[in-house]
Amino acid sequence: METATYKPTTDEIKRLREETDAGMIDCRNALVKCNGDYEAAKRHLSEQGMARAAKKAERVANEGLIGSYVHAGGKIGVLVEVNCETDFVARNDRFVELVRDVAMHVAAMKPEYLDRESVPESIVDERKAEFAKSVPAGKPPAVAEKIVEGKLGKWFEEHCLLDQQFVKDDAITVGELVSGTSGVLGERIRVRRFVRYALGEE
């Protein structure tokens, strides 16, 4: 006996489309695949978006927006540049929301670097040396190396913007947020640079 296929309502499909900007057919298929589990369908669309984003990684992204965010009574300010491929997407509400979300995240979480690749090699070497000192004596070299790499990975997650857990949803990283939006909007999207100012800080 065949299992009945879940049939989403028009309202469910529309709601999912409004929240994800995915196509109507993609939304329907996600709801069917997830047997009506709305949150699972959203995650499925996000994962699809990230997969699609990987294929767009080589495209040129020179359009976009410079977003700003000022917090704490004017004591913290952020500027962030997020690029996309076309001016059309740069005006899309979903893209504008992404730029603001990234700026707010930078204000709240104080990342020092954009991604792992932007951390100077000298800093990475310093952290490795520091973490190596905390490895218990007597550990085999291979085990000690894994411990150091694990600590370094955790350090990247705390200090690099794209590796940080997104402040509004710690189930995803900022990098995953960007990739998911890229997949939904159908263009390459990248955070190019940011700067954070705090009153009185050097």
Image (cartoon, rainbow, N blue to C red):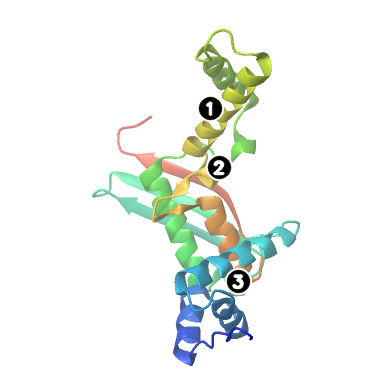
Label 3, secondary structure: give it.
Answer: helix
Residue receiving disc 2: 114
- Residue drawn 51% across the image and 50% down it: 173
Mark nearer the N terminus (2 vs 1): 2
Mark 1 and mark 3 lie on one chain; the one further toward the N terminus is: 1
Q: Dot 2: what SS?
A: loop
- Of the residues tagged 1 and 3, which is closer to the observer? 1
Q: Amino acid at mark 2?
A: Leu
Counting residues from the start of the chain, the first of labels 3 and 2 encountered is: 2
Residue ID at (69%, 65%): 52
Q: Residue 84, position in %: x, y?
A: 62, 63
Q: Is residue 136 above or below residue 64?
A: above
Above or below residue 141? Residue 37 is below
Q: Position of residue 178 (x, y in %)?
A: 56, 58
* Residue at position x 63%, y 20% in the image: 143
Residue type at tag 3: Leu
Query: Residue 188's quadrant in the figure?
Result: bottom right
Q: Amino acid at mark 1?
A: Lys
Label 1, secondary structure: give it: helix
Residues at discs 2 and 1 in contact (Cβ within 8 Å): no
Q: Position of residue 168 (x, y in %)?
A: 39, 56
Return the residue at label 3: 185
Q: Quadrant of residue 201?
A: top left
Is residue 135 found left or right of 68 in the rendered image? right
According to the picture, the residue beneath numbered tag 1 turns out to be: 151
Q: CA distance from mark 2 to mark 1?
A: 19 Å
Label 1, label 3: how far apart the Cα atoms are: 35 Å
Which numbered tag is attached to residue 175? none
